[in-house]
Image (cartoon, grey):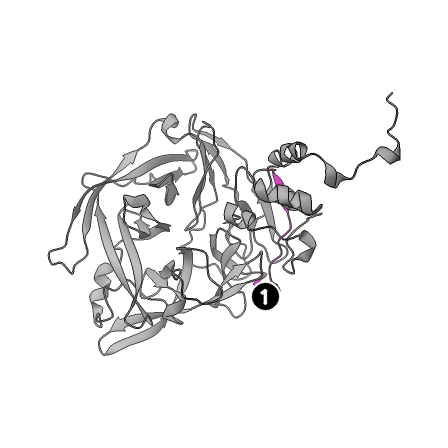
C-alpha cells in the first residue's frame, strides 16, 4: 500500500491543473453536470464557461399535474428541476425554444397563454384572440393554440432592436396565425396588407391540414420566414412584418409547388406524421409511418428550389417550383441527431460520422386534434424512442410511461449561447434550477 500524503501537502481542488479540469468537463455529457461543476469555485466556473457541452441535446420534458420531470438523453437520467411556476403546474405546453423558453396554456383560467422561461423566471403573456378582417373593418375571435414556434429568443424588455415573431398552428377562423410584441394583444392571420378588409385573406391560408411550422433563416439560398407544411406535403413560407404604425401585421407569402410529387398516403390502420427540421443550412421534411402491423419507419427529404415564378401582378405572392429530394444514403445524413416535435424539431451535429439517429415522441394524440376532456389521461407516451437510419432499427431510448394527464411531452432546450452567457450558481436561482439531488 502507498504511504498517505501528509495533510500539509494536500492541495485545494481549486488548484487542480487546468489540463485535468478540461479533461474532466469534456467527459461530462449532461448540462446539469456542467452546472454542478461550475458551482465548485470561480476557477472551475471559468473552465466550464470556456468548455460548453459538446452536444447540446435537449431534455425530454414530461409534464404532470403531480410532478414534472425531465429526461436527459445524454446521461439517461431523470431530473426534477428546473421547477415550474406554481400557476403553470397542470399547464398544456405547445411550444419550446432554446434558452429555456416554453409556450404554455395555463390551467387557470383555461385559454390564457404565456411564454415562460424556466431558467430565469421571465414571462411574456400571449394573446388569446385573433383579429379577423371582414367587411366593415374587423372582429376579434377566440383562438386555440396547438403548436407555437418563434423566430428568435423573446426580448422581455421592449427596445429598438429587431422584434421577434411567433407563428402558431391554431383552431378558429384561421389555421395559421402570427404575433409580435409590437402588434399588441391579438394574433393575425396571413393577410397581404391591412387594406384586406374583406374575405380575400382566406386565399393566403394553407388549403389542407397543417402538420408543422418552423422558422428558417434561409442560409442565403431560400426565403427567410416561417415555413408551413401540410398533410399533402405542400409548403408555404410566411414572413410577417409590421404594417403602418406597427399595430398590425401584414404577411409576405410564398407558395411552393412540387410537380410530380405524390404525398405519402397511410395504409389501413397506419398513421403518417410529417415534420420540418433545419439542418446544416437546409430544410428537411421527415415523414414518420406508424401502425399496428408495421413498426415505425422514417423517410427523409431535402427541399430543393428550382425556379421562382412571380405572380400575375407584381403585388401578388411569388410561387416557387421545387422538389422534395429523398435521402436514401445513410452517409449523406451522418453526423447528426434529430429530435422531432411539432414546431420545435431540431438537428444537432455530433461532430463525427455517426449514423443518423432520430428521437421521436408519441403521436397518438395529434397536436391539432380535439382537446382532451378533463380528468382523463389523454396524452399517451408509449410510442417514443429512437430510430437508426442505417439499419432501420427502433431503439427504446426514451421513457414510455406514465401518460401525462395535462400535456403532450415536449423537448426542453438549453442552447450553447445560453451556457456561454453563464449558468448561474445553482443556489442562486429562484426558479429552482441547479443542483438536483433527486435524479433517478
Q: Nearer the viewer, residue 69 or 374?
A: 69
**Quick one: quadrant of the C terminus?**
top right
* Residue at figure coordinates x 41%, y 38% from the top left: 291
- Which residue is most to the bottom? 136
Residue 104 in magenta?
Answer: no
Q: Which residue is mark 1?
A: 87
- Which residue is most to the left? 312
- Which residue is most to the top? 1
**Quick one: quadrant of the N terminus?**
top right
- Does 255 appear above or below 126? above
Residue range of the region highlighted in magenta in the rendering: 75-88
Pointer 1 local density, CA inside 10 Å: few below 14, some 14–19, many at least 20:
few
Question: In the image, 412: left or right of 169?
Answer: right
Measured as percent of width and height from the top left, residue 347 is found at 43, 40
- Does 209 appear above or below 352? below
Q: Nearer the viewer, residue 192 or 377?
A: 192
Measured as percent of width and height from the top left, residue 168 is found at 38, 59
Measured as percent of width and height from the top left, residue 24 is found at 65, 34
- Corner quadrant of residue 274: top left
Question: From this viewpoint, is residue 142 visible?
Answer: no
Question: From this viewpoint, is residue 391 visible?
Answer: yes
Q: Secondary structure at mark 1?
A: helix
Measured as percent of width and height from the top left, residue 127 is found at 42, 68
Q: Nearer the viewer, residue 213 or 314?
A: 314
Question: In the image, 22: left or right of 202?
Answer: right
Amino acid at each position: 500500500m502507498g504511504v498517505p500524503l501528509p495533510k500539509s501537502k494536500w492541495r485545494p481542488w481549486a488548484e487542480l491543473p487546468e489540463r485535468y479540469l478540461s479533461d474532466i468537463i469534456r467527459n461530462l455529457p449532461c448540462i446539469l453536470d456542467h452546472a454542478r461543476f461550475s458551482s465548485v469555485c470561480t476557477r472551475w466556473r471559468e473552465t466550464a464557461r470556456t468548455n460548453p457541452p459538446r452536444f447540446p441535446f435537449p431534455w425530454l420534458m414530461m409534464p404532470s399535474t403531480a410532478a414534472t420531470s425531465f429526461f436527459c438523453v445524454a446521461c439517461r437520467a431523470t431530473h426534477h428541476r428546473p421547477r415550474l411556476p406554481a400557476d403553470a403546474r397542470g399547464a398544456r405546453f405547445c411550444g419550446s425554444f432554446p434558452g429555456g423558453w416554453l409556450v404554455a396554456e395555463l390551467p387557470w383560467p383555461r385559454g390564457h397563454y404565456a411564454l415562460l422561461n424556466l431558467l430565469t423566471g421571465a414571462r411574456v403573456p400571449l394573446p388569446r384572440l385573433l383579429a379577423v378582417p371582414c367587411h366593415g373593418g374587423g372582429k376579434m375571435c377566440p383562438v386555440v393554440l396547438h403548436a407555437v414556434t418563434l423566430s428568435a429568443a423573446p426580448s422581455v424588455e421592449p427596445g429598438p432592436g429587431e422584434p421577434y415573431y411567433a407563428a402558431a398552428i391554431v383552431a378558429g377562423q384561421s389555421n395559421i396565425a402570427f404575433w409580435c410584441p409590437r402588434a399588441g394583444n391579438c394574433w393575425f392571420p396571413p393577410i397581404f396588407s391591412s387594406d384586406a378588409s374583406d374575405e380575400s385573406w382566406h386565399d393566403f391560408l394553407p388549403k389542407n391540414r397543417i402538420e408543422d411550422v418552423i422558422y428558417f433563416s434561409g442560409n442565403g439560398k431560400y426565403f427567410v420566414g416561417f415555413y408551413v407544411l401540410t398533410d399533402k406535403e405542400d409548403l408555404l413560407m410566411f414572413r410577417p412584418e409590421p404594417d403602418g404604425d406597427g399595430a398590425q401585421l401584414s404577411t409576405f407569402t410564398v407558395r411552393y409547388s412540387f410537380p410530380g410529387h405524390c404525398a405519402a398516403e397511410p395504409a389501413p390502420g397506419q398513421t403518417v406524421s410529417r415534420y420540418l427540421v433545419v439542418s446544416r443550412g437546409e430544410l428537411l421534411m421527415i415523414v414518420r409511418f406508424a401502425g399496428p402491423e408495421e413498426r415505425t419507419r422514417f423517410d427523409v427529404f431535402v427541399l430543393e428550389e428550382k425556379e421562382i415564378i412571380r405572380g400575375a401582378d407584381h403585388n401578388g405572392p411569388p410561387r416557387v417550383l421545387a422538389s422534395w429530394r429523398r435521402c436514401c444514403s445513410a452517409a449523406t445524413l451522418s453526423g447528426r441527431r434529430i429530435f422531432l416535435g411539432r414546431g420545435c424539431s431540431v438537428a444537432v451535429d455530433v461532430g463525427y460520422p455517426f449514423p443518423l439517429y432520430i428521437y421521436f415522441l408519441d403521436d397518438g394524440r395529434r397536436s391539432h386534434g380535439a382537446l382532451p376532456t378533463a380528468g382523463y389521461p389523454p396524452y399517451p407516451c408509449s410510442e417514443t424512442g429512437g430510430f437508426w437510419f442505417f439499419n432501420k432499427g427502433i431503439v427504446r431510448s426514451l421513457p414510455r410511461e406514465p401518460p401525462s394527464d395535462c400535456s403532450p411531452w415536449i423537448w426542453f432546450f438549453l442552447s450553447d449561447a445560453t451556457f456561454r452567457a453563464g449558468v448561474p450558481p445553482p443556489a442562486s436561482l429562484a426558479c429552482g434550477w441547479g443542483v438536483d439531488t433527486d435524479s433517478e
